[in-house]
Image (cartoon, helix red, strand yellow):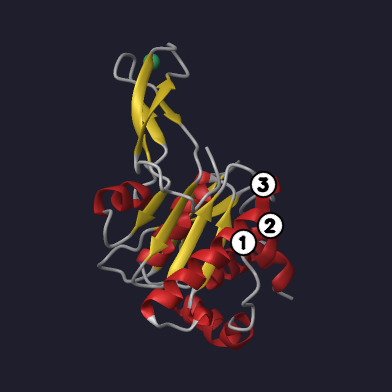
Amino acid sequence: MGTPGKHSVENPRHILVECSSCKQPGFMDAWSYIASTRDAAAREKLLQGKLFKYTCPVCGTTTTMAHNCIYHDTERNTFLLYSTRREAQAECEHTLDELVRKAADANGHDPASYQKRIVFTTFEFCEKARILADGYDDRVIELMKVAIKRGMLEDGIIGARDILIYERTMEDTGGVSFVVTGEIPGDVVGVPQGYTYLKDQWEEVLDQLTDEYRFDAAWANAFLP
Ligand SMILES: [Zn+2]
């Protein structure tokens, strides 16, 4: 598909796909642009990690069908862009800059009040959308994940290849919770105090990172001393 952001085409598109298992052809909806307050059903699929999933009606196999997509969290003035092409980062940055410029113009906002994020996996795309929806700062969550992981590595609880995943907060606990996947799966709970501590500690520095678009584990590892 074409340049992300140029979504004058039908949205969602009804695209022809093929089951990865039995090769039966079928159709799925491919969204190129989702506005959180307008496209409620697509937003819900995104938050549930199902936006890119296709389940074959014949054999029941679920396959990830990746396609470029932009998510606009209109309440939090954030544009999150997923691209299937890692090598297209400069183009993605330009697309986001243009989207912010237009949105800021249209709403009389300061462009600096918008957040821009680029991700290159469908997984990160869904995870970041969930973090935003839950009202957290994704940069702080990434820092928190690295801080927790370092502690667990030191204690020999997990392996270097294990990753921490943000999971939706349970309403009754009010905490930020993480799930570890990899060699030794299990549950870890990141306590809310940990989030608040890191946010207070780094907020001022983080707010100066206006020209950055990528906030992932690699970024957090390099950022934390
Ligand atoms: Zn099938």
Residue that label 2 marks: 90
Q: Residue 114 in the image: x percent, y percent?
A: 48, 75
> Amino acid under label 2?
Ala
Residue 124 in sight from this viewpoint:
yes
Above or below 43: residue 76: below
**Are the two marked residues, 1 and 2, in contact with CB atoms closer than 8 angstroms?**
yes
> Callout 1: 10 Å neighbours few (<14), some, many (20+)?
few
Q: Residue 58 in the image: x percent, y percent?
A: 31, 14
**Residue drawn at x 30%, y 69% as measured from the top left:** 173
**Considering depth in this image, is 81 or 98 the residue closer to the camera?**
98
Question: Is residue 8 rendered to the left or right of residue 4?
Answer: left
Q: CA distance from mark 1 to mark 3?
A: 14 Å
**Considering depth in this image, is 30 or 122 the residue closer to the camera?**
30
Residue that label 1 marks: 94
Residue that label 3 marks: 86
Which structural element holds mark 1? helix
**Residue drawn at x 50%, y 70% as measured from the top left:** 100
